[in-house]
Amino acid sequence: MNTIHQAFCIFRNLGGEFQLFNEQSVPNWLEQRAFLTPDRVAIKTECEIVTFKELYEKSKERAYQLKRIGINKDDHIAVLMKNSIEMVTTIHGLMLIGAVTVLLNTKLSETELSWQIKDVQAVKMIYDESFQERIENINEIEKFTVHMLRLYRNGTAEELQHCLMLNDVATIMYTSGTTGYPKGVMQTYGNHFSSAINSAINLTIQADDKWLVVVPLFHISGLSILMRSVIYGMGIIIHERFDARLTNKAIMDEKVTIVSVVTTMLQQMLEQLGKDNYPKEFRCMLLGGGPAPKPVLEKCRDKDIPVFQTYGMTETSSQIATLSAEYSLSKLGSAGKPLFQCEIKIMDNDCRCAPYEEGEIVVKGPNVTNGYWKRDDATSASIKQSWFYTGDIGFLDEDGFLFVLDRRSDLIISGGENIYPAEIEAVLLSHPAVKDVGVSGVEDEKWGEVPCGFVIPSESVTESELIEYCKKNLASYKTPKKIFFVDHLPRNAANKLMRRNLRLSLNGDNNK
Amino acid sequence: MNTIHQAFCIFRNLGGEFQLFNEQSVPNWLEQRAFLTPDRVAIKTECEIVTFKELYEKSKERAYQLKRIGINKDDHIAVLMKNSIEMVTTIHGLMLIGAVTVLLNTKLSETELSWQIKDVQAVKMIYDESFQERIENINEIEKFTVHMLRLYRNGTAEELQHCLMLNDVATIMYTSGTTGYPKGVMQTYGNHFSSAINSAINLTIQADDKWLVVVPLFHISGLSILMRSVIYGMGIIIHERFDARLTNKAIMDEKVTIVSVVTTMLQQMLEQLGKDNYPKEFRCMLLGGGPAPKPVLEKCRDKDIPVFQTYGMTETSSQIATLSAEYSLSKLGSAGKPLFQCEIKIMDNDCRCAPYEEGEIVVKGPNVTNGYWKRDDATSASIKQSWFYTGDIGFLDEDGFLFVLDRRSDLIISGGENIYPAEIEAVLLSHPAVKDVGVSGVEDEKWGEVPCGFVIPSESVTESELIEYCKKNLASYKTPKKIFFVDHLPRNAANKLMRRNLRLSLNGDNNK
């Protein structure tokens, strides 16, 4: 390790211009963690417990396999996997050889996956066998299951990247936007590190912390817990998927201290919990994914459940603001104040809004992305003088607490997944019987919101025909749950579709 | 604030070459802390308690006073003060206007103070009235007491630096070296921030933490606690000076959880403690300032006192390695492993030593200084490819735990103060009756070590004459406690003085 490390640092240090980069070279996180606290439990799943030393050994083995199939530093590698230790070792393995991990949402359709793989210029793909059918026709890339990787063996420590550069891109995650085309958010090691330590400054780090992962690792909500785990030396418990009963059981029986959830999950947990309550060690229910309904927060308050409402997104590498439990009552409904190294302002037409004035939420911090992969236009449109324009609407109160009113104007949040209407509209418009279309979220008891289509037909077509068509081209969570046939769509003077009015039209409330 | 902040960031962002710097701009720590947790207690002294909001208000007022006396961004300002809230607001006030704080050791002689002030090119000095006499003849600089500053008033938020750049120098502290001339160690905001968060990753941050400051704020051991306080939002208790009884009393009565000490302090505390013991909340006795004698560590072990032995120096902005309490028994005597973003290697003649091989301790990390003020030669001699050569001698065991054998070959550590023999030798040599001289540390029950001189006289002179001469030119802790007159000095083939042999000659042991 040492020779390689030195050589690498000397290489980086050759020119004076590299000085700044060089300053930011630090030991690989997992390697350092395994060195510092080898015997601490790193991860627990239903069937396995691994210490940091074991996790490092497994990840090193994975790194050698990835090397043997021809992956090199800086290669973009698509990962389509379910939460598991195999997924964790794949991510760490890719970091150990300096490749960039592209985390794919496992709910995406073949078309969507194929599009992202092409867009990100991934050269290889690692996937779970269970997705075999879904990716069968994606042929522009070499594909490997974990089973296939195991055929490859051997490697030496010299092949690994023992130090990492905080300015290097570690991961790419796709997020859609109002324009409809998903964009690859580049997250650097520095972004992840800053996210982890600013979260720690706010939530504190306790020696007995155990963070429960019931959100997907391909989302920033899950991946950020993995990063905190190696950075803090904190044990995490990983579930393959969210199940309210198993989540509650883990909190009850496993001395979980923190869990990250979105509203729909919290609701199911509360229902399942019934009259029971969580043990005293459980210190933080980190609630993200959009503004939570007050009744849910009030129910938690009545049960003394320590809810920390948070606001963040893929572009901020997890939280940018979090409400501490000490304010959960007096500032109910707020997403709190920015993390220590972060800033938030509300902007309206290039002017900073006064307290309580609504406007776009604009954020800044070392956890904020440098931009979108190969989308200079989108990057310069949303990042101006280091400030990231979220597109979300909100206000600050007189004490500086953030209240989020609406996510990215038209964004639909369904069970914690972000859905952009424009993406669904594009699919519906491609159907020959659709003349014009608008998509909006409609309230749903279980998912918070679900997408619905408002279609002006050009010829005869049924609701189920259109839904079936969407299913073929979109992840099922994006498929409209209902199609309404209409005569006209609400557009403003500039002919811009007023999607909020679509939803309101359902309630017969057109005042707004 | 906002306009200024924006303007500042836009200015920094003008050229693409500033991008990296710009990424590292973050809100001023105290301002952000006062915004995030205004009502938390920041500092408690014998006579005062201030919250973060109050501390910010006081520091802002101090900043305006400093502005009114003509201090500008990037000015070097000497601070000669005792631990107090006034000293804290002066340091934060200087940070709020972007000036560089030069922290002077209050034990220095007039000659030494004058030399450092000139060397660092300080333009103003803020001092405690009690040092009036000591600095009376230092006329090359404008001098202000806090009392004088209070005559100046008024200012507006626009004059303050609301964001800080992590690459900017925040503080300069002088440290001597083997060459005898003190050197100004430049500590950036990034150095202090990294130091604080890497300490937090290792020691954890608890919501009820309260760190007791009984070490001087002009040393990195004290200043680093002040930095952690604003970064974590943690309360600290400041004593003007160390007193074993008052330190124990604070731990007993004030719910102190952490205290930083050096061996001589710990010994006095143990003696004063008698058969008593510390309360359960007290979780960390952070023990720095050189290797501790085993009997002291064993006594702590027997009393269940959680000692965390640490290794660090001015150049590493506090800790670079710390032994966790979990290893305090199995690795007794070790200074532990590096902090999370830090690295340690042992070098001998450009070769990396194997476990247990002794050599120079060489360290790396984002908390390590970029160099010495205007000493490019000293900087390039001690920092090579981002590795800092400490001059200290030690080894790593097979698990990577650091054992420090000897601080900077000839360094004498007396009651936590670093003393460089070369500095004392230079003073003695300037005496007309001294032909040649060597200075070495000799064991002392109270101070650990005290400096002693070995003099070859050129004419008749007494021990007390020479000690008196030193007192006039050196801080009293540096003044030799004894002078031995000798016929010759131990020098090696290259005529290099073998100072270790001076000490050994006293014991009649010349084997080494």
Image: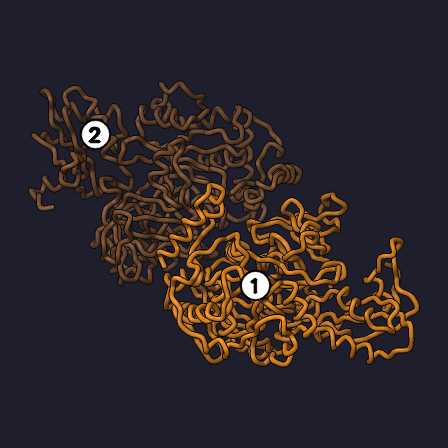
Chain colours: A brown, B orange
Q: Amino acid at mark 2?
A: Glu
The image quadrant where one finds the C terminus of chain B is bottom right
Classed neighbour count for the residue bearing mark 2: other residues with Cα under 10 Å, few (<14), some (14–19), many (≥20): many
Label 1 secondary element:
strand
The image quadrant where one finds the N terminus of chain B is bottom left
Calculate the distance from the C-alpha at mark 2 to the C-alpha at mark 1: 61 Å
Residue nearer the viewer, B125 or A6: B125
Asked if residue B469 is positioned above or below residue B116 in the image, the reply reads below
Residue A329 position, x and y percent, is: 27, 61
Query: Residue B76: which numbered mark, if any?
Result: 1
* Labels 2, 1: front one: 1
Q: Residue at x 23, y 27 (%)?
A: A426
Residue A42 can be seen, yes or no:
no
Residue A472 position, x and y percent, is: 25, 23
Left or right: A464 as drawn, with respect to A310: left
Query: Residue A425: which numbered mark, if any?
Result: 2
The image quarter containing residue A67 is top right
The chain to which mark 2 is attached is: A
Classed neighbour count for the residue bearing mark 1: other residues with Cα under 10 Å, few (<14), some (14–19), many (≥20): many
Residue nearer the viewer, B1 or B47: B1
Residue B506 position, x and y percent, is: 86, 69
